Amino acid sequence: TDPPGDHCQATSGCSSPSKYVRALPVPAGEIDGTNGGIDMIYVQKGCQQVFHDSNGNACGSRTEFWGYDGKWPGPVVRVKQGQDFQLTYVNGLGNDPKGHEIKLTTHHHGLKIAPAFDGHAQPDAVTDTDRFGIDPNALILDGGQYTYEFPNDQEPGTHWFHDHKMHDTSRNVVMGLSGMYLIDPDDSSSLYNNVRDNLPSGEYEIPLVFQDRRFTSKNQFNYPMSHDELLNSNLIGGAGYTGDRMIVNGIHAPYLQVKKTWYRFRFLNGCNARELDLEVRSSSGSLRYIMYQIGTEGGFITQRRQRSRIDMAPGERFDVLINFSGFSTGTRLYLRNVNTQYSPSLPDVMEFQVVSGSVPNYSPPTSLVPYNFNLSPSKTRTLRLNNPSGGRWTIENMGYDPDAANLQVKRGDTERWTFTTEMMMRHPHPMHIHLVQFHIDGVSSGSLADGWKDIVMVPSNGSRSVTMTFEGEPGIYMFHCHNLEHEDYDMMLQYEVCDENDPDHPCDSALLNAFTGGGGGGMHGGM
């Protein structure tokens, strides 16, 4: 592998970085779309000091990253529910270390958005662009740009954006291409009266992007830079990429000074493959019951729920309150990852340092938003997750083809999909469905996963069912494993939203095999 680093003139590494010696960076440069309009994100390379010594000074060289607006993680985009907004992405990344042009397509994960703006993995390989609703210009070449349109016509929630280019998603996310997209509640709807003004905000609302990474001897990301290197690694058919350092908002094991009040944290598991089980513990190791869940990725939940632990699959988000009001000045608390199924286990995430100072008098409500999750499906489907002898993961034994619709759903219909793993599966799979927010069937009321979701963790040798309503624009959307190495090769299929009242998007299963001209090298078939 030829790792990156020339951009930052890297010369040295950091074999033993210190923990809790640098303050948590809060993602800078928030993009305010709450009043609508249009803004721009310039994607470019940057350099970041990830590691520090016991004195808080730089330890080794800065790390090269690829960032939205030249930041890692990227800027927080904040919009208002129901308010149209546009973002133009400009690709200024140039070439990768192999000399190949870096091409981009951005997926805004969790958003109900038209196919042309959904971040299709290979928009230039689609033949019938009108039927599928895909714009080939959505593949952003070096020096090019593309404008995404967001109606934000959905529940307020914690979403994110990341690169989604086929075969390069895993690499590009490792290199830094990720950021948060937050939808605030509509000012006029009484549905959100309890949450609109009663939750921590401003400096007391903080996004936390958790990402594990491996580094070279010069502090550069250690990840295959080409398709051949990734294919020849053990990342595709195995558990995926896991790092040996835990990074929060772009630096290793930071601290955050907190005052004696409530804080709102937007948790994002931005790891490629690692699951996280997060707890707050004291310096002596005792568990502190000060975390409260108020939302899943797709919106608020009905009641505030105390949590001793937040379990997160790759790509999952949780809206979390932590109450520091009962602690004395000087207290140190620790956010710990207690998931031990990966090596190394990376237990040390970040430190909270309680400090004095005047604070707002927050009184977060117990009752949040009165949702009803009783969805009645008109159709059910079973989708098998496979690991063929070739080593690549698949769905229904089909390889990904950007030019094929593998199944059709009727616009406005409610369906239940059951994902099931085949016998002898070695790994769970976090399954993500574009366009929709779903409810996971069979979860107990008040459980961590009881809410609007767009990722469901399917256990090895098990199954999970989700129910959702397809209300989006007609066209093609993807669903896939959010273990990014699995997604890149080849655990992704496409479904078509059809409309019986729209002659341009007829519901006809005979059309499922009709579009194969673009060709992704995968198998074709309808379900």
Image (cartoon, helix red, strand yellow):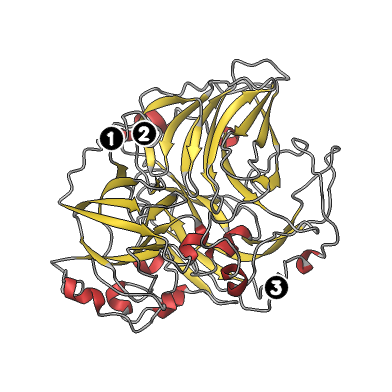
On the image, the x and y values in percent for residue 389 come to 44, 67
- Kindly identify the amino acid type of the residue bearing the numbered disc 2: Ile
What mark, if any, has residue 371 been given in the picture?
Answer: 1
* Residue for point 13% across, 66% down: 500
Q: Is residue 393 above or below residue 525?
A: above
Residue type at tag 1: Tyr
> Disc 1 and disc 3: Cα gap in Å?
49 Å
Which of the pair 263/235 is nearer the observer? 235
Q: Does residue 504 sit above or below 312 in this rendering?
A: below
Q: In what element is the residue under mark 3?
A: loop
Q: Are marks 1 and 2 in contact (CB under 8 Å)?
A: yes
Q: How many marks?
A: 3
- Circle 2 or circle 3, nearest the eye: 3
Where does the image place residue 186, in percent across and percent down from the top left? Answer: 36, 42
Residue 75, position as x, y percentages in the image:
58, 53
435 relative position to 391: left or right: left
Is residue 231 placed above or below 347 in the rendered structure? below
Q: CA distance from mark 2 to mark 3?
A: 45 Å
Task: Work out whether mark 1 precedes mark 2 in sequence or the reverse, and give the earlier one.
Answer: 2
- Tell me whether the residue at label 1 lies in contact with that at label 3, contact meaning CB atoms closer than 8 angstroms: no
Does residue 110 appear anywhere in the picture? no
| Residue wearing tag 2 | 301
Locate residue 147 relative to residue 441 in the image: left or right: right
Query: Which residue is located at x 41 percent, y 33 percent?
Result: 448
Kindly tell me whether residue 370 is visible in this rendering.
yes
Mark 1 crowd level (few <14, some 14–19, many ≥20, 10 Å Cα): some
Q: Which residue is mark 3?
A: 97
How far from the left and from the top, in percent, is residue 177? 58, 59
Numbered disc in front, either 1 or 3 = 3
